[in-house]
Structures are given as structure tokens and as C-alpha cells.
Amino acid sequence: MRISGLRYRHFAESTDSNPDKGTKGRDTADKAHSTKFIKYKYRHVENAMVFDTPFGITAIGIVVFLLTYWGYSRWVDRRVWAPDPKRPTPAHMYMDGVEFFPVSRYVLYGFQWNSIAALGPILGPGIALTFGWLPAFLWIIFAALLIGWVQDYSAMFLSVRKEGRSFGPLAYEMLGPTPRRLLLGFLLFYLLLINAAFLFVVATVIDAFAGAFWTLVVLVIAALITGHLLFRVRMPVVQVTLIAVVLLAIGVAIGVIFNWPPPGTLGTAPYTLWYVPLIALLVAGALLPMPRLVTPMNYIAYYTLFPAVLMLAAGALASIFTGIKIQIPAFTSFFGPFGTGPLWPALFVSIACGAISGWHSLVSTGLTSKQIDAETDVRPVGAGAMLSENLVGLTALAAWIVLAPGTATVPANFVKGAVTLVSPLFGGEAVAPALSIFYASYMAGMAVTILTILGRFWRVTMAEVFSGTSLSFLGNRYVATVLGFVLPVAFVLTGSWINIWLYFGGTNQLLAGFALLIVGLYLFSLRKFHWYSTIPGIFMMITTLAAIAWQTIVFATATATPVVIRDGRTVPFFPQQGPLLQLGGPAAVAGVNAFSTVMGAIMFVIGVMMAIYFLRAFARYARQPQPSQA
């Protein structure tokens, strides 16, 4: 409107400056000038606003996601897996009401989406802005088209065809006992890292927006009520959903009104105090039966996730009218800071869940496959939820790029980007406080719903690793669950969260490579078309091994140089380790970094060994033709 007003004043001045012209002449001049103005206006919108605002990337991304679902995923579904709606699924064959039970595809879609929609697609794009917004955008689009949904959908379908078996048993069947043991060891490191990354972020976000904690408490209460109504009372889904949505709205209102304690009132490291109530919630969630808390919580949290993402998408598409512009360069440099690494491979592990995530294969095979009602539900649940997850990553990117460069180093700043993008649609600054609590709750809810599931996977993995050994007590469900959340906190308090995030991203994407290759190996053994999964699996294996190797070198360098001189001050290699330096001196800093170095080296070696076992398995199946049966 401001631009058109300027053009109108210029037009009025030009016509009034010719008093000798008659009415006819002035009309002719008016029409000519109006035509010029309209052409200029639309050229300006096309050339400036479309490419200077988040509108362009959001519109392109949505089109790609829709075409991928209705085109490529449907083609793979029909040609490769050929779902049979009459074929019994594990949910019906082994129904026990605890892990195996059929769920409506609509409920299960919400469960799957919310179970995979954690902090990866929200924070990853912000970290990737080290290289500019264009590489991040292209990776999200490329992964959405060819990799992300492929893993989620295919791993889920493989598990359904294999009686609901999870990742570990599938690896044992396809690769043998040694790779399975390697995978279990790898999972322990991976789950430790993802728990550490998510716990740190949710604690810092709640510290900045304390009202989000009280909203989170209401979410847990609403989930308990919803689970009881759905699975005990057997109330219809629509009625239960309406009750849950009302409770969620009340929770957000409570968070806005009761935004206590204010930021900065809990000491020098206030976010650490939030770990106590958070761990209490997470331990309870990880121990209770799935229908009691986890399944209903992940389902109803979808009704926070959906409007949050929809509002971000609307804000991004409306940016062409609201004038919210991109503040980040399209491209900066191929080589980022040493701690981050070069664009390849760092970019591909910075954005995890918004592009592809190994965590999704754990959810698809360990949880969702056991709740599939019919094989025809796999594509809308698996592929549909993942492409919705790509939208989460895309809208998060839109929120980050409207903030000043360097903002992504503080996780809670995503809330500021989201409010900047969305607030013009709902009244501007007047609604900013409410929107801040809403998006802080969005981040906290996405993290906590995942962390409860992570606790379950950690507990099961610990039991598998230590059962039958002298350390079998570590596999006790209570001991393992508590350790699963206490150990990550200790790890976070002594490290750099960005480097922990990149370690998590590397192990996460490496796990995705494992899943894609297991699917490819299964299809290859049946002489079915497997390249749609095998090629992405090879790419992810090579890329993530390079990323893990780079971060191992980063921590090794930090170990050799635990402190450096900056501006005349002695500071640690990772600035976030300042409290550790003051508490234990350079030796403590070096010890922590040495542990991180060893952990990275172990994960790299496990990855290389798994790659070798995959090569051997493909060669073995090539020599042993199998009947083409699913």
C-alpha cells in the first residue's frame, strides 16, 4: 500500500501539472499512466516482493510436497509394495492393547506426525543458515522429493510385512547377529545425543517463556483424560478430540496469564532448574503404557502442531502483502566456521527431521507399524506425515530468515521469528505476547512428546544390550529410564550444544542411511525395484560418515587446545564450556572433549563396519535369487 500510494501521488502531480490539457486529453493521459502504474506495480511485486520475502520458497515447497505425495509416492506404493486392504496387519494379528492395537488412519496420522515432529525441523534450518537460506531450502526440497518420505513409508511397510518387527530384529534378520549388536550399541550413543540436544533446548525455551511450562502441564493432563476416554470409555474420536482441543486452548490461556517466573530471576544458569520437573514428567511418560499417555498425547499435540504450522505457512505466504522481508543472504560461503564444517557434509546433518531423520524409522517400525489398521493406511500415515514434517521444516526456515543473521545461535529466538512472521495477520504487536507463549509451547510440546518415546526406546535398548550380563541391573525398566534422562543432562551441562546438535544430526542421518539400506536390501532379496531406497541410503551413509568424522576432529582439536586466548581472556574452545572451565579448570574441559572425541570415533567405526556388512549382504543376496514374494 505504501508503494502504490507513492505512485498515486506521483501520478496526480503529473496530471495536475498540465492545466492546458482538456478533459479528453487528461483522460487519455490518465489511462496511459494508469496502465504504466499497474505494470510497474506488478513488476515490483514479482521482482522484489516474491523473491525478497518468504512467499516464494513457501509456495514452491508446498507445490513440491503435494506433487510428491500424489505422484511419486503413489507410484512407489503401487509398483513396489502393492498394499492389500484384506491382508491382516500386526495390529490385528497380535492385538494386546499395549503395543499392538488398530488405530484409525486419521488418529494414527496425527500420532505419527507429532511423534516425528520434534525440534529437528525447527532448529536445524536455523543452524544451516550459516551457509545462507538457499542451500537450506534446496536440501529440504530435495530430501522431501526423494529421501524423507521414502524412509518413513518404506520402513513402516517393511515392519508391517514383517509382523511388526522393529529396527533391531529387522537388522538381525537381514544382516546377521553382529550387525544387530553394532546397531544396538550405536543406538545407545544416538539416544544419548538426541536426549541431550532436546532436553537442553526445551529447558532454555521454557526459561525464556515460563508460561510454556504450565501449558505443557495442561497438555499432559489433557493426554491422560483423552487416553482414558478413547481406550477405556470408548468415546467416539470426534467427541474426544473436541474435548482435547478445548483443554489445549485452556492450557495456552493459562500459559499466557501465568507466565511465571520471569526470565532471569532463577540465577546465572536458570534453565538447569527446569530439568527437575521435566525429567519427572518424562520418566512418568516413558513408563506408563502407550494408550495411557504417549499415544493420546502425541495425537492431541497434533492440534497444536497443525495450527502452529498452518499459521507460519499463512504468514509466509502473506509476506508478499505484509512486507516481512528475508534478512539472511541467499548464500554466504561453502566453508562455514571450523566447528560447523563445510557445506558438505554439515548442511545435510544440520537439518535433520525437516528433511530426513533416522528417528522416524524407529517410530515407524517400533510404534506405528504395530497400530496400522490396514495396509492401505501406510502411505497416508507414513508418507503423508513425513511430507507434513517437511512443511514444518520449511515454515521454520521461513521464520528464521526474517530475523537478523546470527540469531539462530539462541534456540528460543525461533519464537521471535515466528511472531514476526505471524503477528501481522492477527493484530500486530497487541497479540505478540500470546503468540510468543503459543510458539514457545509449540517447541516445548514437540520436544516432550518425542522425549517420552525416546525414553521408551532407551529403556528397551538398554534391556537388550545388558540382559544376561553382569550389568543386567542397567536394563531394569526403572533404572534404565532414569539414566536415559539424567545422563544426557550431565552431558549437556559440560558441552557445546551446537556441536552436540551436529553430532546428533550425524548419528541421526546415519541411522536413516541404515534404514534405507535395510529396505533396499529386503526389496533386492525379492528382486523388486529397490533403487528408490538404496541410492538415497548410499548417499546418506557417505555424507553422515563424513560429518561424524569432521565433528570428531573438531572435538579432538578442542581436547588438544582446551583453552585459548581471546581479547586477552582465557576462554574454552567452546564458549559454552565457560562454567566447566571455572569449576574444574583446563583439565576438566579437556577430559569432557576427549570423551566426545572417543564417542565420535566409536560411532564412525560402527558406521564403517555397518557399511561393510551391507555390502556383504547385497553380494550374498545377489548370489542367492529369491522368489518375488512380499
Image: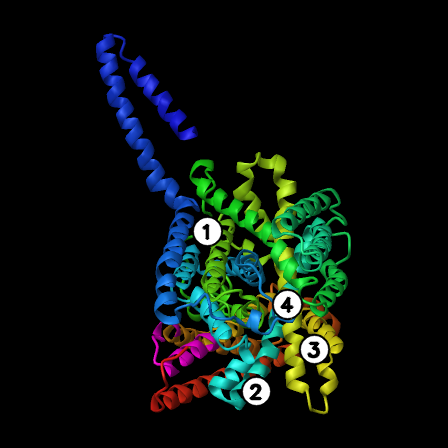
Quarter holding the C terminus? bottom left
Check disc 4 and report its element: helix, strand or loop: helix
Q: Is residue 367 visible?
A: yes
* Front disc: 2 or 3: 2
Q: Position of residue 530 (x, y in %)?
A: 36, 75
Q: Quadrant of residue 469?
A: bottom right
Which is nearer the eye, 570 or 95? 95
Amino acid at circle 1: Ile
Of the two numbered discs 4 and 2 on the same chain, state the one appearing first in sequence.
2
Residues rendered magenta in the picture: 514-533
The residue singled out by tag 2 in the image is 181
Could you say which disc has been placed on residue 328 in the image? 1
Check disc 1 and report its element: helix, strand or loop: loop
Please state if 480 lies on the left or on the right of 398 as rendered: right
Amino acid at circle 3: Ala
- Between the residue at mark 4 and the residue at mark 2, the CA separation in whole angstroms equals 22 Å
- Label 1 Cα neighbours within 10 Å, binned few <14 / some 14-19 / many ≥20: many
* Front disc: 2 or 1: 2
Q: Position of residue 338 (x, y in %)?
A: 50, 70
Residue in the image at 66% along x and 68% along y: 97
Amino acid at circle 2: Arg
- Between the residue at mark 1 and the residue at mark 3, the CA separation in whole angstroms equals 37 Å
The residue singled out by tag 4 in the image is 453
* Front disc: 4 or 1: 4
Check disc 3 and report its element: helix, strand or loop: helix
Q: Quadrant of residue 564?
A: bottom right
